[in-house]
Amino acid sequence: MLASFGHIGRLARAAFVLAREGVFSGIDPANVPVSARLPLALARTIARRRTAAQGARLGVAMGKLGPSYVKLGQFLATRPDVVGAAAVRDLEGLQDRVPPFPREVAVSIIEAAFDRPLAETFSHFSEPVAAASVAQVHRARLTPERGGGEVAVKVMRPGVDRRFKRDLGDLYFAARTAERLVPDARRLKVVEVIDALARSVTMEMDFRIEAAAASEFAENVADDPDFRIPAIDWTLCAKDVLTLEWVNGTSLTDVALLRERGCDLPALGRTVLQSFLRHAMRDGLFHADMHQGNLFLDHQGRLTAVDFGIMGRLGRRERRFLAEILYGFIRRDYLRVAEVHFQAGYVPGKHRVEDFAQAIRAIGEPIHARRADEISMAKLLTLLFEITALFDMKTRVELVMLQKTMVVVEGVARTLDPRLDMWETAEPVVRTWIEGNLGPAGKVEDAAATVGGLVRGALALPDLMLRAEKILGQMEGAVEDGGPFSPGSLKETAAAESSRLTLAGVALWIIALGVAWKVIVG
């Protein structure tokens, strides 16, 4: 009970801070449910008097509420059509200009992590050059004994893990309360979404995990001519310290400087979007925090990503779903888009495919062949939410991070080229993946994977039979102690089950060999 009061108190404080900073003042009461109009009127009453710097209010509120809300602000900073251009100008400051903690604190953390004085590791260690919600970055030079190269040293904010755990507790409380009171919240699996966020935050709090993600990501993109990952110095990585190659380049937050350098901004926007799609579909591993503050253009004209604390993964099934959905929208084949949703189990079978295709057309047609500056993403998301509710679609937790990142990436590309045609830009990447994975070569690969799965299943049958025999033996002992079945009937059941498993093993081997033969002979 006391914990609940704590959650309510902190959530109420968050609502008060947002209201006090005027975040809700611009909301039209006609667009909110009747039950929410009184709280909205109260929020507008307590808002500070408006000034010329209207957009600063949202950024100030997010900064006051802590790292979890700063993360939310970073996302909103890519959506000028949702929160307005004035708010975006302020929210962009949350991406890498959060107030830093003192250099001396960072030095003590590093010395404790490596159990030696700082001077034995770095010949130079700067004041913070960037600070974010979880950590801050210092520019340093390794000692001559370590090669003398320039590096970026990322240091965890003291106490940030405790703050995140507390904020996550509040979000869990709000999610569970919403699922009890609001039917749509149960359909959207709000608690499961918070579960995914909690797992992500837990991994982000250990820089050794981030280093591993960066290493795997770098291997995947090693042959990409327009995208790169800075090298990790594994000898200088710890739970709360990460050291990697210093990136000499221009941040994508500074569009004016990019333009001054003669950068082809529309081409860079296409690279941002196509790189994300390529990583998601080709590799199944993508950078899930691709806001402008984490992207640089190096002196060789390559897009360079940093900050790998939040990475997304897609299995082959999800990648196929993503490719077919995007390609269906690109080709305006809404029936195919609907069929894929049903095949994946994302829409309950009680609905008609044709009806869902019609609803999908209502989303696709207004945005097809239109530039980004002609599309209201806020209205599009509202329409999408209404349609998913109409067809009882439940949130797919494994796709939440993908959906979120797609919106962020599209927003970044849009800041570089407001006239970007998302569908035309995505088409070459999606088509290449489909040709390689859903064409003849992809079918052979699928067949080989099926054979492998069947073989593994057949090889596991002996162990399964032993486990079944053990369980049945335990059941027999329970019966002898007074259970409802006779020992004789249990023995007969065990014999029948053993025979069935043996026949299943033979059948699996026959199927596996048959599929293998079909693959070999074509």
Image (spheres, helix red, strand yellow):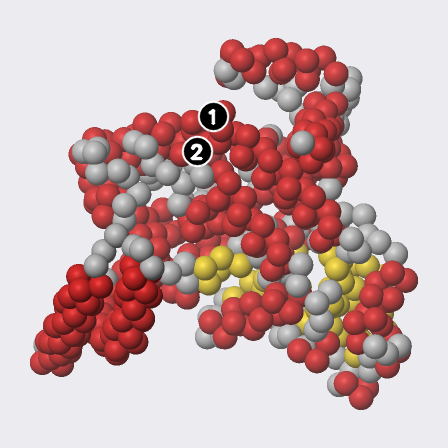
For the residue pair 453 and 315, the one nearer the viewer reads as: 453
Give the Cα separation between the discs numbered 1 and 2. Answer: 7 Å
Residue 254's tag is none
Q: Identify residue type, mark 1.
A: Val
The quadrant in which residue 228 appears is bottom right
Q: Which residue is mark 1?
A: 182
- Left or right of residue 134: residue 218: left
- Callout 2 environment at 10 Å: few (<14), some (14 to 19), or many (20+)? some
- Callout 1 environment at 10 Å: few (<14), some (14 to 19), or many (20+)? few
Name the residue located 82 percent from the left edge and 82 percent from the top edge.
143
Q: From where the camera sits, is residue 278 visible?
A: no
Q: Identify residue type, mark 2.
A: Arg
Q: Is residue 325 above or below residue 152?
A: above
Q: From where the camera sits, is residue 68 visible?
A: yes
Q: Give coordinates of residue 423: x percent, y percent.
A: 36, 46
Q: Give coordinates of residue 63: x percent, y percent.
A: 74, 39
- Left or right of residue 106: residue 336: left
Name the residue located 78 percent from the left edge and 67 percent from the top edge.
139
Residue 186's tag is 2
Q: Secondary structure at mark 1?
A: loop
The quadrant in which residue 274 appears is bottom left
Disc 1 + disc 2, Cβ < 8 Å: yes
The quadrant in which residue 67 appears is top right
Name the residue located 38 percent from the left edge and 65 percent from the top edge.
282
